[in-house]
Image (tube, helix red, strand yellow):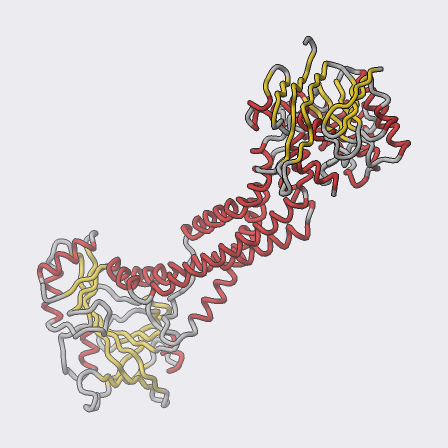
Amino acid sequence: MNGVIVTASHVSRVFPMPAGPVTAVRDVTLAITRGEHTAVRGPSGCGKSTLLHMLGCVDTPSAGTLVFDGRDVSALKDRARSLLRLRHIGFVFQRFFLLPMLTAAENVELPQAEAGAPKDERRRRTLELLEYVGLAARADHRPSQLSGGEMQRVAIARALANRPRLLLADEPTGELDQATGEHIAALLDRVNADGTALVIVTHDPALASRARRVLTMRDGCIEGEATG
Amino acid sequence: MRAIAFAWRSLVRQPARSTLGILGVAAIGALLFDMLLLSQGLVLSMRDLLDRLGFDVRVTAGEPLPGAGPDLADAAAAAARLAALPSVRSVTIVRSEIAGIERGDGRSIDAVFLGVAGSLHIWTILRGRDVAAPGELVLNASGAELLAAEPGATVIVRASCADENEAPPPAAFRVAGIAELPFERPDESTAATTIASLEEACGGVQTDIADFLAVISAGDAAQAAADIEAARPDLSAFTNDQMIGRIEQGGVTYFRQISTVLTTVTLAFAMLLITVLLTVSVNQRLGEVAALRALGFSQRRVVLDVLCESVLIIGIGGALSLPCGALLATWLDAILKRMPGIPTDLHFFVFEPRALAIHAALLGGTAIAAALYPMRIVARLPIAATLRDEVVS
């Protein structure tokens, strides 16, 4: 399919547990295309985050095939998967996971440095991203000096640092109050509108309703799909 | 941001923990440094003293250490025979006896009374001048202080040479100078003169004997020793290297064994300390590490970050350990030198560049070994499961 970034074909993910194997994702088939905005909803433990992790190449399916940019992810070595994530995928986490010993700017600069971007380009891109998320004035602040919403904005800027084609957000408003969550949702909308494909896992119906495509999961399966 | 800069930031993030780690390594590193100095110190110091004697082959009638074997008879003839060998540059006869030395004011001491015949005088003049005429001697600083004798003073020597029941004839000597002898002990008095003057003080009994012959080789000490033993199979010739070898085979091995055991123990402590610190540190930020991995940081990079932290802690602690170790070594050396019979210039802890290199290599190895387990944790970190666990917790 033209414009497809990642395709999951009949993927399942089974976790071995002492009490017996647990199937977190069961026979899911899904494609994420360029520029699309998808939300994945469902009750806790339904496999949303596991599906997101597989789409983001941090986890591999126990069965089925996951193809990112035409490459079978299961066949890639760890180093190649890391490189793929670094260059093509951005992650936004519920708990931000900013590095507390670095400033906002340094947090945003870090993935660019890992990708080997020249210093001047990194500085310019970092400033541009912090301006994009409205935090240029807080560039030299550490995460402990920022509010929850500001931290998540820095995390979004960090996720966009290497111009990913796909941004994955796992409960991005889960730790924020409603008003701050609205701001983050609006920011994510803008990221998507600017061309980055977005997949959001959320419990929040308001956040999910902003997506053009909403997948509902239950017991590891995609139970329904709505497009708006 | 380079791994080392990143690791530095991680250390600064936990200043108390990092400081404790660094101080722990500094203390352990100081002990390690001292163990390394101790392991070779006595041998190095002994070699230095032997070299300072000014000769490189000693010839005895038996055992290499003076006084350990029989006297060497017909010393003058033996010296002349050896001096004629092409591999020998010069031969000096060395004989030692015990003497009572007194001044007219009633001060008296018991001293080692040394006599030499030849071009080499195995002492260094501190004040005054060397023995130049019959009836002159030099005193070591301890003897001079006890006798309150300065150059120019006259002393009476009662040497005990052959038969201790026979009263030695008193002989007047003029103190020519105050000298330092390489193997003198702090509480030991020594007087030195020519063989002729010593034999005269001995009343002319048992002449022409020596404790040993001090030989300066023409350049190759081993060759000279071989030539000497070939020329005089009844004599034993020992180079300074052979002397050191004998010393190393003897009591010094205890120091080396103790040093090896304590070095191993201190390194094990350093490794455990850093492993625990890094493991705790890594376990507290598994979520961050998993997030970095999710963002595309390679396994190699996060492992390198941990290794750099270990290297920084051990590197900084190791650097601090050197001055601490040097101070501790000085203190311990002073304690050990209080043991009776230890020559003033003999040291147990002696610095050598090799010790520094071994110290750095051992600590470097410890840094890597200490980081292995925490590196394994981050290398094998399941990214997805960790991110999930962090949210659940």
Front-lying residue, B226 or B388: B388
Q: Quadrant of the C terminus of chain B?
A: top right
Residue B225 x %, y %: 17, 58
Residue A2 x %, y %: 68, 8
Front-lying residue, B393 or B146: B393
Horizontal side of B321 relative to B388 (left or right) equals: left
Question: Is residue A36 placed above or below A147 in the rendered structure?
Answer: above
Residue B1 x %, y %: 64, 32
The structure residue drawn at horizontal position 85% and vertical position 30%, both measured from the top left corner, is A204
Residue A52 x %, y %: 71, 27
Horizontal side of B330 relative to B206 (left or right) equals: right
The structure residue drawn at horizontal position 12% and vertical position 69%, both measured from the top left corner, is B76
Q: Residue furthest front?
A: A20
Q: Residue furthest top?
A: A2
- Residue B343 visible, this angle: yes
Q: Residue furthest right?
A: A179
Question: Is residue A172 placed above or below B165 in the rendered structure?
Answer: above
Q: In the figure, residue A43 lies in which quadrant?
A: top right
Front-lying residue, B370 or A61: A61
Horizontal side of A42 relative to A13 (left or right) equals: right
Q: In the figure, residue B301 lies in which quadrant?
A: top right
Front-lying residue, B313 or B44: B313
The structure residue drawn at horizontal position 63% and vertical position 36%, both measured from the top left corner, is A21
- Residue B117 visible, this angle: no
- How many numbered marks does the figure carry? 0
Horizontal side of B294 relative to A42 (left or right) equals: left
The structure residue drawn at horizontal position 38% and vertical position 64%, both measured from the top left corner, is B255
